[in-house]
Image (spheres, rainbow, N blue to C red):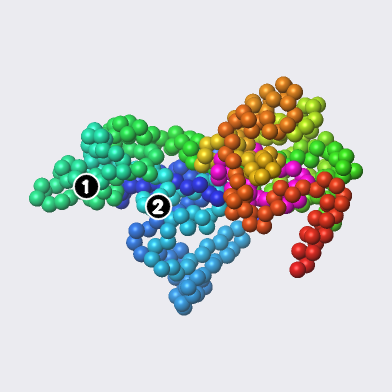
Amino acid sequence: MVEMKSPAVAFVGRHNSGKTTLIVKLIEELVARGVDVGSVKHHSHAGFDIDIPGKDSYRHRHAGASETVIVAPGQMACVKTIEGDLDCSRIVASMPGHDLVIVEGYRKSGLPTIEIMRQGNPADVKAARVFAQGAREGWSLDSDFTQIGRRVSDADPGRIDYLDVSEKLPGSATVAIVSDIPCALEAARLYGIPSFGLESVSEIADFLERSYARPKVTVVIQAGGESRRMGTSKATVSFGGRPLICRLIDRVSSVADELVITTNEPDNLSFLLEDYPKLAIRLERDVCAARGALPGLYTALEVASHPYVAVVACDMIFASPRLIAAEVEALTRSGADAVVPVNKHGYEPFHALYRKSACLPVVREGVEAGQRAAQYVMRHVNVREFPQSEVLAAEPMGGCFVNANTPEELASFESWYLDAQHR
């Protein structure tokens, strides 16, 4: 099973800034909105236990086990001995499948950070003063604030008392400020950083959803129903003893927040609703009478509920969920309208990812103008090309774009597949 990488954002601040209180409220708010949230808590001090002394798992650990996994129905925990402090990127990488991971601490993780400063915390007040002074003097966020910290210190002028401000102030990774300290909010405004009050939980949740939560993905398997060269519906033709469409569902459903099959034979595919009850598959007919690749893409984008739409042809026997996951990451990072694999044969529009808001109007316009080729959309949107090297990095086995158009081709692929299964 392939799961999407989880995006993450870190909430940072000095001791007693109120990080945990705010994070708990944010998790409750985001979960209530249907966001799948993971969390990481960084302890600055060494050592902690999650089990009760005297329990069996506790006894396992204290007998010398370097790793103990505690499992109960619906719950699992792992305690493992490690060398030093684990890098935050490795922790987040071990937590795929979440819409967002909220990290408490790990200022130097390289993650986007949200800085918390509370009026009732003297250390925060001092840091806010340094932050504001730097903003007024035009210091960049990646500057060393130590010298400013020395000048505005309210401690004995004879000693350095700036609370490690060079390490504990907003920096180039800061994406928002949460504070009730006026000068901190002023500094955020001068730096052009979004700012929120300590009680602005709903507004902060909006910001996180809009800017950092993983966009939901609709995966559309195109199974039109016509196949002159195959002589029968590709969706229901047998492959490995099962309808070919089942193979596609098994391969790509793990990366789908919504799974849609576009087909002109919904009655013949209604068995899928019973075979995959947990997937809530939707069977959708073409939305326009015109035939062709672009009208098919129009249907896929029109019926999708989510902002990202991955389109896969039902005859792509080795369609790759890893490739879809990599395309999602590339679309998010690039801000493009579409991520489309490209090789010596040109674009592969039917194992590609589209941003619905940008691509649907263009595709609709093309269809209304009588266009039929999927290449039309590539000429009118911002495409992030996905070259063969990146395809192979995502899916080392390759073969993602192989499709079966005739009974002979299908039989050849099936024979190879069955042989590989028994090696």
The secondary structure type at the circle numbered 1 is helix
Q: Quarter holding the C terminus?
A: bottom right
Q: Relative to 160, is 81 above or below?
A: below
Residue 57 placement (x, y as % from top left): 51, 71
State the residue at coordinates (54%, 67%). Answer: 69
Image side of residue 112 versus residue 142, left or right: right
**Residue in front for this viewpoint, 350 or 62:** 350
Rendered image quadrant of residue 139: top left
Residue 247 placement (x, y as % from top left): 77, 52
**Residue in front for this viewpoint, 421 or 189:** 421
Circle count: 2
Task: Residue at the far left: name it.
Answer: 158
Residue bearing the label numbered 2? 109
The reply to whether residue 315 is visible in this rendering is yes
State the residue at coordinates (90%, 43%). Answer: 231
Q: Local crowd at mark 1 within 10 Å, few (<14), some, or many (≥20)?
A: some
Residue bearing the label numbered 1? 146
Is 321 contained in the magenta span?
yes
Distance from disc 1 to disc 2, alpha carbons, whole Å, reads 21 Å
Image side of residue 45 versus residue 394, left or right: left
Which residues are the magenta region? Answer: 306-331
The secondary structure type at the circle numbered 2 is loop
State the residue at coordinates (83%, 51%). Answer: 409
**Residue in front for this viewpoint, 417 or 347:** 347
Residue 161 placement (x, y as % from top left): 17, 50
Q: Quarter holding the N terminus?
A: bottom right
Q: Relative to 182, is 406 above or below?
A: below
Residue 255 placement (x, y as % from top left): 64, 48
**Residue in front for this viewpoint, 236 or 232:** 232
